[in-house]
Image (spheres, helix red, strand yellow):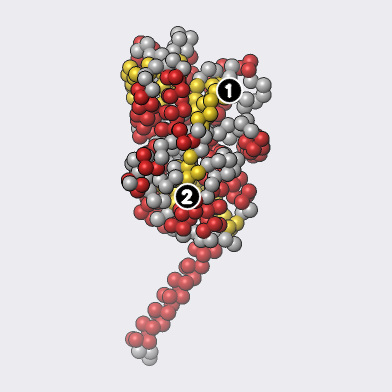
Amino acid sequence: MASRIEKLGVWSAAVATCSLLAAVPALAQGVKIGILNDQSGVYADYGGKTSIEAAKMAVEDFGGEVLGQKIEVVSADHQNKPDLAVSIARKWYDTDGVDMITELTTSSVALAVQEVTKEKKKIDIVVGAASSAVTGANCSPYGFHWAFDTHALAVGTGGAMVKAGGDSWFFLTVDYAFGHALEKDTSEIVTTSGGKVLGTVRTPLNTSDYSSFLLQAQSSKAKVVGLANAGADTINSIKQAAEFGIVAGGQKLAALLLTASEVHGLGLKAAQGTVLTESFYWDLNDKTRAFGERFYKRTGRMPSMIQAGTYSATLSYLKAVKAAGTKDSDAVVKKLKELPVDDAFTSKGKVLANGRMVSDLYLFEVKKPEESKRPWDYYKLLATVPGDTAYPSAKDSGCPLTK
């Protein structure tokens, strides 16, 4: 009979063999990118399932593999619930082999998931969430922010409207981290530009009735009604503002986060004259038009800065992995901050030490129906806002990592 020591030796060898076998799938699984966003709720059109297609386009354009490993895109709907998003992120990192999570619509979700990625020493690239805290007070060594943020939107729309005479504001603010940050950043730009804030009202996420809020905005006599919301909330508030005669009565609507997706949902009749800022428009130049047409063939709609930003974030990550020669997060972070961003989204992007990707933004006015020459021809370009003007420097961002 084998001795107890011999049995223990056999058992240990078996355990070691099982461990090696278990490791094989992890090595063979390649590079996994997770698209975590709202696919069924208030922000479903804002980013949603078409952001997944944008990420897949980036993978295809990169060649489908990196470091000899296949690239895979996985996705999940976080339903705008931070606790659900955190649960998904942990499972993706701990058991599913996901290397990077991106899109991350909804600021409360993005900030919560970024804490997980910091703990796991993984990489996240926020695109769909707006709070400037992502690369400000809540910055992470492994966190990045692409496309836009509340500070850039405030500079683009808030600053421009004050200069144009819109020097008194009333805010309709969705009541969670994103809305609060957008109102705060825009209020600061308005007041430092010589304007004043006459009042604000907080609105529930995904509410269908804006009547009482719009009446308060109307009675304030503010020259500008600032909509610190997004997605279906922006659509509903603009539609109901038209019903209340807000614009017809002489007040201006400033949609502080409005994309081509929501303008499409509204239609030009309701959205005409609205001023907004985006960091991408499909009809800006030959490169954006080519990307837009490809995207349209896959999805039946033109991309907004969210989908184009997800494409850029995914492609930039893959370029960084290739340049680093490894998936190791610290090495990839270093390359993400070194490499220029040159793709369909922007030709002159750069990543700051706090993880903020800086590129130009554009101030647009939504066209009147008779000004539109073809489907998705929605914007008139009013001004270009240089990236270095739109975003603070890393040392001025409030990120403790850059002190």
**Left or right: 152 as drawn, with respect to 69:** left
Amino acid type at mark 2: Lys
Q: The residue tagged with tag 2: helix, strand or loop?
A: helix
Please report the residue visible at 47 percent of the width from the left and 49 percent of the height from the top: 337
Residue 83 sits above or below residue 377 on the image: below
Camera-nearest residue between 38 and 225: 225
The quadrant holding residue 352 is: top left
Q: Amino acid at mark 1?
A: Lys
The answer to which of 369 and 384 lies nearer the viewer is 384
- The residue identified by callout 1 is 380
Which quarter of the figure is the N terminus placed in? Answer: bottom left
Q: Is residue 338 toward the left or the right of residue 377 in the image?
A: left
Nearer to us: label 2 or label 1: 2
Instruction: State the separation of the CA atoms marked 2 and 1.
Output: 33 Å
Q: Secondary structure at mark 1?
A: strand
- Residue 231 lies, with reference to residue 240, above or below; the image says below
Q: Residue at x 37, y 45 (%)?
A: 139
**Picture residue at 42% right of the left edge, 28% below the top:** 154
On the image, the x and y values in percent for residue 47 come to 51, 36
The disc, 2 or 1, on the residue closer to the chain's N-terminal end is: 2
From this viewpoint, which residue is outermost toward the top?
249
Residue 312, image x, y percentages: 55, 43
Eyeballing the image, is 309 above or below 4?
above
User: How many tags in the picture?
Assistant: 2
- Give coordinates of residue 392: x percent, y percent: 41, 37
Residue drawn where x is 67% and y is 24% of the image: 374
- Residue designated by label 2: 337
In the orientation shown, which residue stands out farthest toward the bottom?
A: 1
Q: Is residue 63 visible?
A: yes
Badge 1 density bin: few <14, some 14–19, many ≥20, Cα 10 Å: some
